[in-house]
Amino acid sequence: MTRTIHILNGPNLNLLGKRQPEIYGRDTLDDVAAACAAIAQEAGLESVLRQSNWEGQIIDWIHEARETAAGIIINPAALTHTSVAVFDALMTFEGPVIEVHISQVHKREAFRHHSYVSARADAVLAGFGVHGYALAMRHMALLLAGK
Ligand code: DHK
């Protein structure tokens, strides 16, 4: 069985570290990938981090994960609040799904308070900064170990 965790990131997160650092911080997605890879390795897992600004690409990656991933950590970014299609795609995935938001979305604009993805996610993290990805990876390792 695959031991790979797919970490999927939606629109505008390619600019992490440069975009509104007062909200999203100064770490980049490369920093997130390195931190998650180290935690995955400790747990006997592997991780692959991907980002796209295109909804269809995120959906294709979720479909691919059906065959190649033990679990999905996803920050759908703005698609969180708009995409039934991302929710439907996640419903086709049988392993654990953890939803991450860098910012505390519930303290922000009302349109960020609803997530289509949360109805599928096994855990949701918001407001931990990029550290939320590392926490999600640690929790993923526990879930896959049946703890
Ligand atoms: C990232 C985004 O790009 C926003 O559209 C979401 C999320 C929040 C985050 O906090 O990681 O509303």
Image (tube, helix red, strand yellow):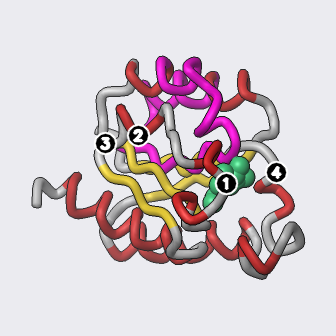
* Viewer-side label of 3, 2: 2
Magenta residues, start to end = 60-88
Provide the residue designation for mark 2.
Answer: 118
Q: Position of residue 36 (x, y in %)?
A: 51, 69
Tell me, yes or no, if residue 133 can be seen here.
no
Are the two marked residues, 3 and 4, in contact with CB atoms closer than 8 angstroms? no
Along the line of sight, which residue is nearer the eye, 8 or 100? 100
Q: Position of residue 147 (x, y in %)?
A: 10, 61
Q: Is residue 74 visible?
A: yes
Q: Earlier in the sequence, mark 3 or mark 1?
A: 3
To which quarter of the image does residue 137 belong? bottom left
Q: Is residue 85 magenta?
A: yes
User: Is residue 75 part of the magenta span, yes or no?
Assistant: yes
Residue under the point 52% across and 59% down: 106
Q: Disc 3 designates what residue? A: 96
Q: Amino acid at mark 3?
A: Pro
Q: Is residue 143 left or right of residue 44?
A: left
Disc 2 marks a residue whose amino acid type is Ser
Q: Which residue is mark 4?
A: 12
Residue 28 position by quadrant: bottom right
In the displayed structure, 90 sits above or below 8; it is above
The residue wearing badge 1 is 109
Residue behind label 4 places its C-beta within 8 angstroms of ligand 1? yes
Left or right of 15 on screen, residue 28? left
Horizontally, residue 104 falls left or right of residue 52, namely left
Q: Earlier in the sequence, mark 2 or mark 1?
A: 1
